[in-house]
Image (tube, grey):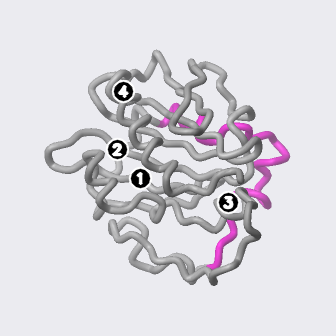
Amino acid sequence: MLRIGPASRWAVVALAACTASACAQESAGRAIDSTDIPENTVGTGTPPTSSRPPGDTAPGDVGAELEATHPCEVLPEHEVTALGFDPESAHFDDFGIIYSCWYEPLPTGQGNLTLQLDANKGVDTINLTGFSANEIQVGSLRALRITDDLDPRVCQVALALDEEVHVSVMVSFVEDTEEACRLAEAAGALAEQYLPSAR
């Protein structure tokens, strides 16, 4: 079941750097070929298989590589399971400027895990108004740990793949901020191994 109540305030961070011109109706969303998303992907928990042809991006173009990446294909199933989430529950979201995949917990776990890809904005353009952010290191990547005193069960870690590209890992609906950030940072460290990075 999709639970969105307490985390709705986090849309401000997820939509980050959105200006009136950048979020105009004609530019909202992400244009992808419908063949890239099988019918059984949304809401069924079935991870997609990409139909994008190989060699579709230039080597070393981090933004293009990330744009060609499906968020539900970043983490292998065994890594999702190791974090305490159910890989079979993968839900793909592509609405507005959101391009993400979120997972429900295993029966023994708690919370939700969301992986959001942004091939057009760097971490320094995230709108942090009303949130607390601390610069950290996740693996070899510079990152921001973003929290909110009004919603202590959520933590977001924004990974800087380069100056203009980032990936956010968010954990929500856990017992407290410390646990949310522990899981988000662990997920970020795993995701780094599978994400394109600046060469």
Q: Please name whichever residue, 6 or 198, is drawn nearer the observer in this view of the structure.
A: 198
Question: Between marks 2 and 1, how big is the CA–CA gap?
Answer: 7 Å
**Earlier-in-chain disc, 3 versus 4:** 3
- The residue that label 1 is drawn on is 102
Under circle 1, the secondary element is strand
Mark 4 Cα shell of 10 Å, populated few (<14), some (14-19), many (≥20): many
Give residue 61's position: percent from left, percent from top: 75, 61
- The residue that label 2 is drawn on is 112
Judge from the rendering whether residue 29 lies leftward or rightward of residue 35; answer left or right: right
Magenta residues span 8-33
Judge from the rendering whether residue 184 lies leftward or rightward of residue 56; answer left or right: left
Mark 3 Cα shell of 10 Å, populated few (<14), some (14-19), many (≥20): some
Q: Which label sits on residue 153?
A: 4
* Rendered position, 162 above or below 156: below
Extreme residue toward the top, this view: 149
Under circle 3, the secondary element is loop
- The residue that label 3 is drawn on is 29
Of circles 3 and 2, the one toward us is: 2
Q: Please name whichever residue, 181 or 161, is drawn nearer the observer in this view of the structure.
A: 161
Residue type highlighted by circle 4: Arg
Judge from the rendering whether residue 135 lies leftward or rightward of residue 119; answer left or right: left
The question of residue 10 being in magenta is answered with yes
Under circle 4, the secondary element is loop
Q: Quadrant of residue 11?
A: top right
Of circles 3 and 4, the one toward us is: 4
Extreme residue toward the right, this view: 21
Tell me whether the residue at label 1 lies in contact with that at label 3, contact meaning CB atoms closer than 8 angstroms: no
